[in-house]
Amino acid sequence: MTKQFVCAVDVGTGSARAGILDASGTLLGRADRPIAMNQPKPDHAEHDSRDIWSAVCAAVRAAREKAGVAAQDIVGISFDATCSLVVRDRQGDQLSVSTTGEKRWDTIVWLDHRAIAEADECTASSHEVLNYIGGVMSPEMATPKLMWLKRNLPDTWNEAGYLFDLADFLTWQASGSLARSQCTLTAKWTYLAHEDTAWQRDFFEIVGLDDLFEHGNLPERASPVGADIGPLTAQAAAELGLTEKCRVGAGVIDAYAGALGVLGGFAGDEQDIGRHLALIAGTSSCVMAMSPDPQPFAGVWGPYYGAALPKLWLSEGGQSATGALLDHIIRWHGAGGEPDAAMHAKIARRVAELRAMEGENLAARLHVLPDFHGNRSPLADPHAVGVVSGLTLDSSFDSLCKLYWRTAVGIALGVRHVLEALNENGYLIDTLHVTGGHTKNPLLMELYADATGCTVVEPLADEAVLLGTGMVAATAAGLFPDLNAACLAMQQGGKRRAANPAAGARFDRDYRIFLEMHRQRQALDAIR
């Protein structure tokens, strides 16, 4: 019997990646291609969905070539993507979401914060749907972006015939199906998957989107993650370099793919899975915890039913800028420059030397509150700002290294802050499974263990996000009876790092200061 393979596609903020995996979860070949982003004004960020699809096709063809796998042996494909909003007209052609009016910019990027006022309006509605997004609407979700479009680009809104989360757009491009994933709709479109009537139409009426369903081509019911949506169309198969016998699976948001990739080994273990947290950390960071029962509370998105693994509720927290914040610190400092991999590595080496010379209390009076792009969790405050305390006139490279180190400490303490919120509301998390770009940063990986007191597991799989999406594709292809079985068969395990008990007191002090800085920022904001 011919061996069968699957293709996983991951569309991030700056690139599209593709991987070819076998049924044991081994990544045989991967490739990536850049995607363009337009930022015409502050807080606006836009993609070109045709550019994204072209990058996806090029990456898939290159990955298959690297893997040395025949096109006819790839039996399943699935997509994960950022929670960006794609708008097409009634003929399926591009529509501008940009203040520039250029049609090619038809996608509002997840990190775009143009709709912050609309998000506040949604929160002020106090509607039931807010109980399943942590009580506060984020400008990163679909509803406020749709409100902004209708108000500010009425021609685009009037012509719109299709509205997609980006992963669902890619599924549509691949299969022609208008099915939407339970992951995307539940996590970003206020779809209540656990309810018989999942769409709460009165909410959309309250926020002025009573005509949403005339423009969106949205289904009444979402498709479970990994559902077989159908085969590739002839055109998509040709463009991707695959065949029409390849099945397309209902996909996921990118961070949810990472959660499947690192927590898939606990699929079906409802009693134990609540001890484990997925930390998907790159430009920003997402933390995801799953449980058999809903754990709703303010400041953490969810609980979302079936948004990753079937029959489990998922709570999602996060930090809006982490890797992006370290890049910003490098650009911002006089001794910095371009924040490429070589610069990050150079700083990490020098931090290690400085700690060896000056001791573990390096720059102990320097403190960073890392909310430079708002606080996603646990405060759910997109208006929050960053704070740095303890600066001097030193502008040397060593001062950059100290600021970078203490910013990394602040990022790790932010994870601790989210963890405490989760554990105060029903979870018992003691293990962090970290994936994404931060696994390449030795300072962050050390801090995630020592500053939180948790065991940190780094997945053996190079690409946990691609692995998670591969699990989804394998389910759709029928290689396994369900998603749980695919996760258990394809999971790759990881290497463990225990927290250093000697570091506990130092980071306890830092954490007390971290919380006090939150309080002081609040007090300053309250002065009129």
Image (cartoon, helix red, strand yellow):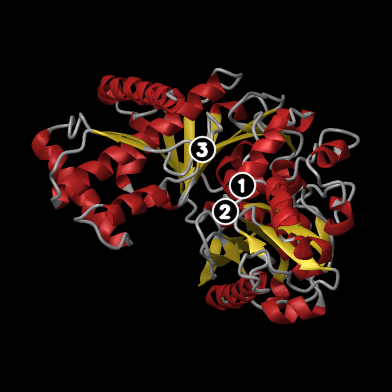
Closer to the observer: label 3 or label 2? 3
x%, y% of residue 321? 45, 46
From the viewer's side, name the closer residue of 314 and 407: 407
Q: Which mark is residue 261?
A: none
N-term-proximal mark, 2 vs 1:
2
- Sequence-wise, the earlier of marks 3 and 2 is 2
Label 2 to label 1: alpha-carbon separation: 7 Å
Residue at image position (82%, 50%) is 223
Q: Secondary structure at mark 3?
A: loop
Spatial CA span between label 3 and label 2: 14 Å
Where in the figure is residue 339, as x and y percent of width and height? 32, 59
Q: Quadrant of the N terminus?
A: bottom right
Q: Is residue 358 above or below residue 86?
A: above
Q: Given the image, on which type of amino acid does mark 3 rest?
A: His
Please indicate, yes or no, whether residue 473 appears anywhere in the rendered image.
Answer: no
> Residue 22, how many percent across, how many down?
62, 62
- Circle 2 is placed at which residue position? 112
Tell me the SS state at disc 2: loop
- Which labelled disc corresponds to residue 140? 1
Do the numbered discs 2 and 1 sit on residues whose CB atoms are within 8 Å?
yes
Element at badge 1?
loop
Residue at (39%, 26%) from the top-left corner? 524
Residue neighbourhood size for the residue with mark 3, other residues' Cα within 10 Å, grouped as few (<14), some (14–19), many (≥20) = few
For mark 3, what is the residue? Answer: 383
Mark 1 packing: few (<14 Cα in 10 Å), some, or many (20+)? many
272 or 429: which is nearer to us?
429
In front of the other: label 3 or label 1? 3
Contact (Cβ within 8 Å) of mark 3 with mark 1? no
Residue 116's x, y, as percent?
Answer: 60, 44
Q: Amino acid at mark 1?
A: Glu
Dot 2 amino acid type: Asp
| Residue 462 in sight from this viewpoint | yes
